Amino acid sequence: MVNPTGRGLFPSRLYAILDPAEIRGRPWESVLKALLEGGARVIQLRAKELSARELLEVANKGRMLIRTANGQWIVNDRVDVALAADADGVHLGQEDLPLSVARKLVGKEKLIGVSTHDLKQAREAEQGGADYIGFGPIFGTATKETGYAARGVEMLREACRAVKIPVVAIGGITEANVAEVWGAGADSAAMISDLMRAEDVTAKVRRILAIHKKAIGNRQ
Amino acid sequence: MVNPTGRGLFPSRLYAILDPAEIRGRPWESVLKALLEGGARVIQLRAKELSARELLEVANKGRMLIRTANGQWIVNDRVDVALAADADGVHLGQEDLPLSVARKLVGKEKLIGVSTHDLKQAREAEQGGADYIGFGPIFGTATKETGYAARGVEMLREACRAVKIPVVAIGGITEANVAEVWGAGADSAAMISDLMRAEDVTAKVRRILAIHKKAIGNRQ
């Protein structure tokens, strides 16, 4: 089910983050279905407001929807929930469990992604056995207070050169600027707000993937 | 290390809950040492304000201190942290991971306690394989908004009759009323505020254990 190299994770070039607190009161299932319908295939569940029991329920139901679509389902922070829901992976911030600890718990079958904010963290995550890194915040972000200033596209370019594992750019990425991060070499672009707050989530995803095809696809 | 029956968990009759947010700015290590010095041997780590990484660090350091004293170390909520820190057990509220899910993750070697608030939940936890239950809130509580009215000592008595596994009374228990919950049949009394806010934690624990010896010990 899981591609062991990690590189195969991001053929769609979009890393969608589903946050039930950001979806303007809509049912999360409908937003997830809309993401899949639009073509998103790597989706992270981030839901800091939910209890572990609620998170597990979302993770379990979401896994079924995502597997049917041949997508990958990554649970943020909670390694225990990722294991219990048999998600495809877990994503760790710098304040979450350390990579080495999480790897012991999930084994090699599950993907582990690590949020990184500078080249040192990026290299450490690669050396520690991360399957991919998040790198950012690239632009200013409305969703999450990271405590880091915007890294910009040039530092993203350096990060993409610094590691061999896939790099997921994150932080303030929207339909309007996503071509820049792909152009800088990011394997994938993570998006939360621009997706979650979209009136028509399916159409939003389709437009984003069409941008990749048009602006970047021709060069590859 | 762990007593598989669970009953052996509570010879000291005190279930101390260490919450770094409640210790008036003192270092948590000094409070933990004071608890052990006073004679506490079952200690739960509850630290909702800490990140997973911080929680793991406390859990790891605490485990070493507690093992040296032949105590038991229970991590609240986070099954992954309990596993990673090799704690003796994990404690689950009704909003945390379900007992059956947690059991699959931790196996039979680790204790699982479940917070219950009525006889139905108490019986369910026992049938589901919990090693002990918390039951409460017995009195009004200053520490945690449980959403449940005070259960009182009579309902505690019923809970102790309803299940065979150990019952840890919790909620508003202090040095002043702890004899009542032991008198009602509770195997142990959980305390947070009265311990955490004590000027001299060691002396507080000693006084509490002396109350048990004097008021209850004579009858056994």
Image (cartoon, coloured by chain):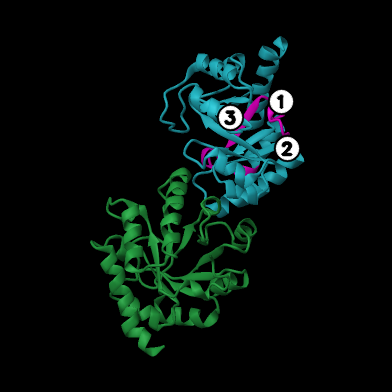
Chain colours: A cyan, B green
Residue B146, located in which quarter of the rendered image?
Answer: bottom left
Point out which mark residue A2 bears: 2
Measure how far apart labels 2 and 1 are at the Cα level: 13 Å
Q: Is residue B132 above or below residue A187?
A: below
- The residue type indicated by label 2 comes to Val
> Which labelled disc corresponds to residue B53?
none
At mark 1, the secondary structure is: loop
Residue at left 43%, top 71%? B136
Front label number (2 vs 3): 3
Q: Which mark lies nearer to you, 2 or 1?
A: 2
- Report crowding for label 3: few under 14, some 14 to 19, many 20 or more residues within 10 A (C-alpha): few
Residue A118, how many percent across, how many down? 48, 24
- Please identify the residue farthest to the bottom as the structure is shown: B219
* Residue A137 appears in the figure: no
Given residues A38 and A126, the one toward you in this image is: A126
C-alpha distance separating marks 3 and 1: 24 Å
- How much space separates mark 2 and mark 3, taking CA atoms? 20 Å
Please provide percent x and percent y for residue B178.
34, 76
Instruction: Please determine if labels 3 and 1 lie on a single subunit.
Output: yes
Q: What element carries label 2?
A: loop
Q: What element carries label 3?
A: helix
